[in-house]
Image: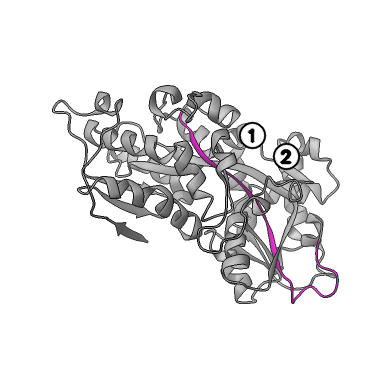
Amino acid sequence: MKFTTTLLASSAIVGAGTLAFADAHGNMAKDMTLVSWGGAYQASQDKAYVQPYLGMHSDVTAVWDESSAEAVAKLRAMNEAGNVTWDLVDVVAADAIRLCDEGLAMEIDADEVLAAAPDGTSASDDFGDLLVSDCFIPQIVYSTTFGYRTDMVGDTPPSKICDVFDLEAYPGKRSLEKRPINNMEWALLCDGVAKADVYDVLATPEGQEKALAKLDTIKDDVIWWSAGADTPQLLADGEIVMGSTYNGRLFSVIEEQKQPVAMLWDAQVFDLDGWIIPAGLPADRLARVMDFVKFATDTQRLADQSQYISYGPARLSSAPMVGKHADLGIDMAPHMPTDPNNAQNTFLYNYEFWADYRDDIDAKFQAWLAQ
């Protein structure tokens, strides 16, 4: 699904470093194709920095493509065909590493391309350890966790991740993402593997079979999702008792839609999300993207995004600026995955592991699904 957003306003403004990327005539493209995930997250991006950017550039058009879940495969195909139609792509960190390693994403110097913090702190220091790839421009810290129907779990709501595997205590359908990431880790944790050993075990064929065997115990009761909006809808409709999705999507269904849903924060998996710029863009399209991404990832814009969704901004300088929800007026800090009350037992996602093992484990997982 695609939709176009345009906004008429004042004159175009070109960033000081942007013309270095422009074509021989100093031209910048008048349209951009931005790739994201749809739903509440994409809406937060549109409100926080796409609309404001278009408001400063009356002649520019932005088109959204909701294909981020398929970004790696589609960019491979576009590259093979010699026709890259996307200008900026929102991906998780592990996919950014894969795309960078394959030469499908452009390497950048953060301090040359991105804005410094208001106090002059360089972009590389402001983003810090979240710059996990030379091609990755971080936007948010989020988590994948579980929501559950408060009216379908009896007097003892689930409190531990392994309650997901307890069909006796919590009968009913679950939803899990249709990929191995997170599911394999949770399965091993609930099959007795220590948190510190999960990736060592998962690196072995025996460990992969162990994880799939644990998932087998609930497979018949799982609805598999591909889009982040699926689980919130399934919860709202009462079709599942619990399901995994991104914490910001659950915030939306709980606080904005007022559905009888609550969060299960135990063993939430922290992850990063951000932009990559496809390699090999023509000079005029690259110039436009560079101008946009410098604006869209500055301190104010990342703080603004937290007004619309409960994801932590990737810049240190943005964190103190997290305030109230733009429409609800509630404090957003307690709804962030990084809030101390929510982060008592987290699982740290291993980007490098999945960059290395993703294709092989994907194939094994999909074969298991088909059985």
Q: Where on the picture, by quarter, is residue 105? A: top left
Q: Secondary structure at mark 1?
A: helix
Q: Residue at x 59, y 33 (%)?
A: 356
Which mark is on residue 202?
Answer: 2
Let me know if residue 160 is in the magenta part: no
Viewer-proximal residue among 181 and 58: 58
- Against 71, is 263 above or below? below
Q: Is residue 188 left or right of residue 174?
A: right
Q: Position of residue 47 (x, y in %)?
A: 41, 54
Q: Residues within 10 Å of mark 2 (few under 14, many from 20)?
A: many
Residue 312 placement (x, y as % from top left) = 59, 45
- In the picture, which quadrant includes the C terminus? bottom right
| Circle 1/circle 2 CB separation < 8 Å | yes
Which of 71 and 361 lies nearest the eye of the viewer?
71
Residue 206: numbered disc: none
Could you tell which of marks 1 and 2 lies nearer the N-terminus?
A: 2
Q: Describe residue 89's horizontal placement relative to residue 188 as left or right.
A: left
Question: From the image, which quarter does the N terminus lie in?
Answer: bottom left
> In the displayed structure, does residue 225 sit left or right of residue 186?
left
Amino acid marked by disc 1: Phe
Q: Which residue is mark 1?
A: 353
Out of 49 and 371, give the one closest to the viewer: 49
Query: Within 10 Å of the Cα at label 1, are there few (<14), some (14-19), or many (20+) other Cα atoms?
Result: some
User: Which residue appears at 86% of the width and 47% of the height?
Assistant: 192
With respect to residue 326, does 107 lie above or below? above
Q: Residue at x 35, y 54 (%)?
A: 64
Question: Is 267 situated above or below 153?
Answer: above
- The magenta-colored residue range is 135-158
Disc 2 residue type?
A: Leu
